[in-house]
Image (spheres, rainbow, N blue to C red):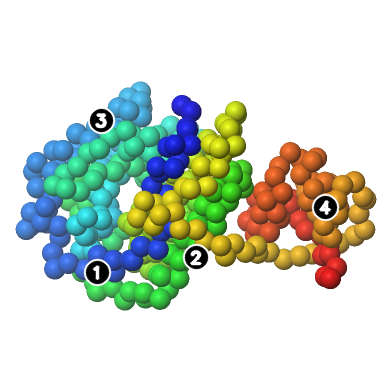
Amino acid sequence: MKVFISEIHQSTISLLSEEIDYNAFKAKDKLCPYIFQPNGQLIKEVRKALLETAENFYAFLQFDWLENGVKDIWLVGSMAGYNWSEGYSDIDVHLIMKYKEITDNESLLSNDLWALKSLYNKEHDIQIKGFNVEVFVQDINEDIKSDGIYSILRQTWVRKPVKRELNINKRKIGSFVSQIEQKIEKALKEFRSNNFNNALDMTEDIKEDVMKLRSNGLKEEGEFGAKNLAFKALRRNGTLDKLNRLETLSFDNEVSIGKTPKENLSSSKVGDKKTGGKQDNSLQTIGKRKEGKKIENKGGYNDGIAYSINGINFTSLRAAEKKLGLSKSTIEYRVNSELPKWQAFKKITQGNKN
């Protein structure tokens, strides 16, 4: 499907900065009454709907050749505890399977299942009592960081939740959220400048940062630590949806052919209708400059800084741009990135200051 600039102009990408609703993280006095009975069991019609959803998802995965493929079906996350919130919490349903019964390459299977669950959740809009239902597949040996785990299949608690008041560190949460939002603003600035390849690199890197924020947070502090709550805040205020949209638009425009200068110019107006496309002009580059060996002059304008890219030395960005077919902004971003995947892009000398 071809994406037109008019769609980009009307997209909902914004400069974020939406206020975090900290009250949504506070513990409630009881389990969610919309899905749980006073005795702690799921309401009958809710359980029936969730089992039907799980069955439909399993059929979608096409593992019907497995004997006893689903070991259990769990309700996890905030809806399985006292920190649920209206308007934010999802009903997270996990199909528990034994990956080794499917393949020895569990890592590849995990990636495939992630893609399949994303596709299923995108195609379906299942709601129960106003809460969105999301499905997932989990290996039976995987440790999940959830305060409560309820077996929908066996109608019993695998892990009973404990009511606790959270010590919410607003400063730390706000700092983590702000760091991600600032990176997205910089990627958006690149997009508006028609540097689509650079914007795509940046959005991919930001998504890695977001996943690290969550995984490290769960390992270090658990479900209600500052990092995981920051992840929840980014998801709840729509930031992650906007990041995904920006990544998609960046890729589509990077590979599109035949757009007129007028169309390319209009793409710089990407912005939220409420903000009027306000733009951040504080783009800064980060990274360490390294001094290196004398390099061979490969020709072209010398901007005073030398580069080593995939083992090839260049005396300027322009020379690297001509040889690699990448824009100068993309090369500069990768050079300054601290992510391991861009380690082959290096700045090896610093130019003289006038």
The image quadrant that residue 80 belongs to is bottom left
Query: Dot 3 lies on which element?
Result: helix
- Which tag, 2 or 1, sits closer to the chain's start? 1
The residue indicated by pointer 4 is 316
The residue identified by callout 3 is 56
Instruction: Report helix, strand or loop for mark 4.
Output: loop
Specify the farthest residue to the front. Answer: 262
Measured in 3D between alpha carbons, the distance from the residue under mark 3 to the one under mark 2, in whole angstroms, is 39 Å
Q: Nearer the viewer, residue 69 or 118?
A: 118
Q: Look at the numbered discs 3 and 1 and tell me whether their residues touch, using CB distance below 8 Å.
A: no
Few, some or many C-alpha atoms within 10 Å of disc 3 (few <14, some 14-19, many ≥20)? few
SS class, disc 1: helix
The disc, 3 or 1, on the residue closer to the chain's N-terminal end is: 1
Residue under numbered circle 1: 23
Q: Which tag, 4 or 2, sits closer to the chain's start? A: 2
**In this orientation, which residue lies closer to the viewer: 267 or 217?**
267
Image quadrant in which you'd find residue 217? bottom left
Whole-angstrom CA distance, mark 3 to mark 1, is: 35 Å
| 328 relative to 77 in the view: left or right | right
Question: What amino acid is found at the position of numbered circle 2 in the picture?
Answer: Gln
Cα distance, mark 4 to mark 1?
52 Å
Q: Given contact means CB atoms under 8 Å apart, are the residues at marks 3 and 2 in contact?
A: no
Amino acid carrying mark 3 in the image: Asn
- Residue depicted at x 32% and y 24%: 64
